[in-house]
Amino acid sequence: MKKLLLVGILSIFSWSFLLAQDKGGPSPEIFEKIKAEKISFFTEKLSLTPSEAQAFWPVYNEFEKKRFEIQRQIHEIERMPNEKLTDLSESEIEKITNTYIGSFEKEALLLKDYNKQFLKILPKKKVLMMYRTENEFRGHLIREYKRGQKKD
């Protein structure tokens, strides 16, 4: 159960409360806590000024919501039970593989589009740092999760 929670937390980059509802996963309170921690983490690491933060967060949250939906589609295919795979026709398999690859293409186009928007909002160096900070935040969440496990 704890591993499921970790996977859920790490795979979710959209902090939208609506996406967290009625999914049977971690509670909305956990998502809100992580969202608040992410805002603090990014604001500190990127040294966002109040005006930069005001312009950045609505765009970033929109981006994360769209990226989460694409990643959800990818994970649905990746988690497809083996029993279901054996029952698929060749044409169904081809359609699923095309959908799978198409999801990565959609994600790449989304990144390209939002990169342009981020570059209009933040200095170029901060945009580059933002991408690194996303990975650092994932590592931070893993460390915090492990630290919590040791306390249990």
Image (spheres, rainbow, N blue to C red):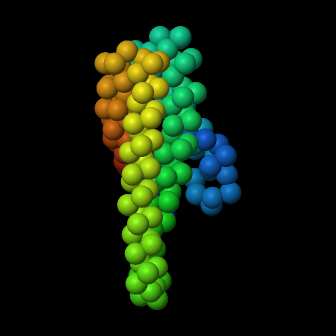
The answer to whether residue 38 of the structure is visible from this angle is yes
* Residue 111 location, quadrant: top left
> Which residue is pictured at 45% across the width and 41% down the height?
110
Residue in the foreground of this view, choosing between 43 and 149: 43
- Report the label total: 0
Above or below, 25 against 118 in this view is below
Q: Position of residue 69 (x, y in %)?
A: 54, 51
> Which residue is pictured at 58% across the width and 57% down the height?
25
The answer to whether residue 7 of the structure is visible from this angle is no
> Which residue is pictured at 34% across the width and 32% down the height?
131
Above or below, 127 against 112 in this view is above
Most extreme residue toward the bottom is: 87
Most extreme residue toward the front is: 91
Above or below, 29 against 130 in this view is below
* Residue 147 location, quadrant: top left
* Residue 134 location, quadrant: top left
Q: Position of residue 92 (x, y in %)?
A: 46, 79
Residue in the foreground of this view, choosing between 51 and 4: 51
Using residue 12 as the reference point, say whether residue 127 is left or right of it.
Answer: left
Above or below, 65 against 24 in this view is above
> Which residue is pictured at 51% across the width and 48% down the height?
68
Q: Position of residue 77 (x, y in %)?
A: 45, 68
Q: Position of residue 148 (x, y in %)?
A: 43, 46
Residue in the foreground of this view, choosing between 110 and 5: 110
